[in-house]
Image: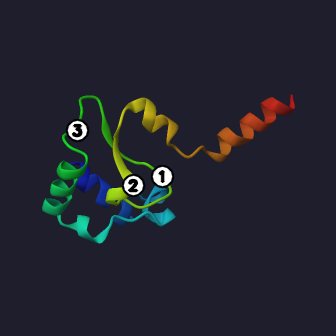
Amino acid sequence: MTWHNMLQRCENPANKDYRCYGARGIRVCDRWHDVAVFIADIERWLGPRPGGYSFDRIMNGHDYRLDNVQWSSAQQQALNRRRSAWYDRAQRERRAA
């Protein structure tokens, strides 16, 4: 499921999340197009998924590749999100008031 969703977000323009991933130029490294290689790499380098954690990119503007992924808690993932233009504008308006 993790592997499939990752590829869909990055490579399928019909996917609802493509605009936030593939359309921004975020790709999946070539070797991870093979699910067996992906699983072997993750198990070897990150180990089993801890309970309550999910697969996450460390630098959210960069590709899915071994040196840019980790297991993250929901709190860690929330800190690794792009802010929306709406959020930025609302923050500026509050500071100016």
Q: Position of residue 63 (x, y in %)?
A: 41, 61
Kind of residue indicated by mark 2: Asn
Q: Position of residue 48 (x, y in %)?
A: 18, 40
**Quick one: SS at disc 1?**
loop
Question: Which residue is pictured at 24% across the width and 69% down the height?
Answer: 31
Disc 2 and disc 3 in contact, CB within 8 angstroms: no
Question: Which residue is pictured at 32% across the width and 58% down the height?
Answer: 66
Label drawn at residue 68: 2
Q: Quadrant of residue 83?
A: top right
Q: Which residue is mark 1?
A: 59
10 Å crowding of disc 1: few (<14), some (14-19), many (20+) = few
Q: Which residue is mark 3?
A: 49
From the viewer's perspective, tell me whether residue 65 is left or right of residue 51.
Answer: right
Q: Position of residue 2 (x, y in %)?
A: 25, 49
From the viewer's perspective, tell me whether residue 46 is left or right of residue 63.
Answer: left
Q: Foreground: 41 or 7?
A: 41
